[in-house]
Amino acid sequence: MTAQDDELGPLIDDCVHCGFCLPTCPTYVLWGEEMDSPRGRIHLMKQHAEGEPIGLPMVEHFDRCLGCMACVTSCPSGVQYDRLIEVTRARVEEEHRRPFGERAVRELIFQLFPYPRRLRALRGPLRAYQRTGLDRLVRRTGVLERLSPALAAMERLAPPLGRAPRLPERVAARGGHRATVGMLTGCVQREFFPGVNAATARVLAMEGCDVVIPRDQGCCGALSVHSGREEEGREFARRTIAAFESVDVVVVNAAGCGSAMKEYRTLLADDPVWGPRAEALSRKARDLTEFLVELGPRAERHPVDVTVAYHDACHLAHAQGVRAQPRALLAGIPGLTVREIADPEICCGSAGTYNLLQPEAAAQLGDRKAANVRETGAELLVAANPGCSMQIATALGRRGEEIAVAHPAEVLDASLRRRGRSALLPD
């Protein structure tokens, strides 16, 4: 019996199969299939723990799980489904050999997205591809769909790319010094949404923080850990810990990254060298909105006359329990009207690499979320995770609709710098 078996047994037994998770599970909502619900998947985990080999049908049900953690929020028994699915996915990757095409797509994803320098090398060609209109031609032909649904999803999700400003290693506090914080720049966030990082650094500085941005930081490991590539995730985690040990607080502006960093203590718990260092890093990781509320406002807020719809990213709301803080920051901006989106607990379908590996299910969930966003009548969608921003914008595009998208940092930045709605909405 392995250490994972020792861990899984008690966690599986916590589930009493009450069904409270069913209405919050995105795949159960879509299909109504018991084995595509959390308790159904836990039943499959129990079968495997009792000796049933991991076969293709079992793998398919595990792969269809988004890992959104809505079931963790809704469970009255405190079942740690987040840990159950991560351990199970690691077991799948160890014991199940995927078809060649599937392995190739997964390897492409994990050799590209966790490496900012590789993403940066892709920016130039991708920007030219968008600016020449070749992207529209390729989509009309459907050639990528026929070649690989995952590649087609990757191409559709790419946001419009502009210039990518580079941040210095340190941004000085304005006014009196209140704190020194480290800032994670991320992978997709850094290369596809650089304006979010720039806005984050400015907001922190205007609130009196010296912002340390280590040049040697890389991927936090979130994509790897959430996909069962645990050893790869551990290596990314060790590098991240080493990059940020000199600061007292690490501010994160991407929900999936923040969730992963807060769980380093679990990921590296068995490592006698890195375990204590992981525990220390997990204690000082904060979502940007969480940290700003703890710090309290000092910089003056100026009016931003915009109606926004705030989207709860799953790894912020469910995994980290950060719901009130983004809303509190937005409510503190004069002139801003915040509208709630129906069914906020149901994932938009992004879920890390899910919209690449399960594009059909992801598209169905994206369409649901897009319809709910449109029902708010908002001018601007605010989301605290790059994957969610790309997913919902793409779903709206399929409907022939567009909406401006911003991160809470960008909305706050527009207020603090007196830039108003013009900074957030196209002319």
Image: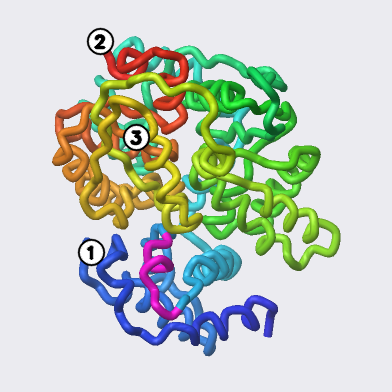
Q: Position of residue 352 (x, y in %)?
A: 45, 47
Residue type, numbered disc 3: Val
Q: Which residue is mark 2?
A: 427
- Which span of residues is magenta-colored? 69-77
- Residue at image position (33%, 53%) is 347
Inter-mark Cα distance, 1 to 3: 24 Å
Element at badge 3?
A: strand
Q: Position of residue 302 (x, y in %)?
A: 39, 19
- Residue at image position (43%, 23%) is 301
Residue type, numbered disc 1: Val
- Left/right placement of residue 298 relative to residue 358 reads right
- Which mark, residue 382? 3
**Crowd class of label 3 (few under 14; some 14 to 19; many from 20; radius 10 Å):** many
- Residue at image position (72%, 61%) is 268
- Left/right placement of residue 29 relative to residue 37 reads left
Task: Tell me the quarter of the image containing the C terminus.
Answer: top left
Element at badge 2?
A: loop
Residue 109 in view:
no
Give the quarter of the image for residue 38: bottom left
Element at badge 1?
A: helix
Q: Is residue 262 above or below residue 413?
A: below
Inter-mark Cα distance, 2 to 1: 38 Å
- Which mark, residue 29? 1
Task: Tell me the quarter of the image containing the N terminus.
Answer: bottom right
**Crowd class of label 1 (few under 14; some 14 to 19; many from 20; radius 10 Å):** some
Q: Nearer the viewer, residue 221 or 403?
A: 403
Say whether marks 1 and 3 touch (CB < 8 Å).
Answer: no
Of the numbered discs 2 and 1, the one sitting upstream in the chain is: 1
Of the numbered discs 1 and 3, the one sitting upstream in the chain is: 1
Q: Per the image, is 26 magenta? A: no
Residue 6 in view:
yes
Q: Is residue 307 above or below residue 110?
A: above
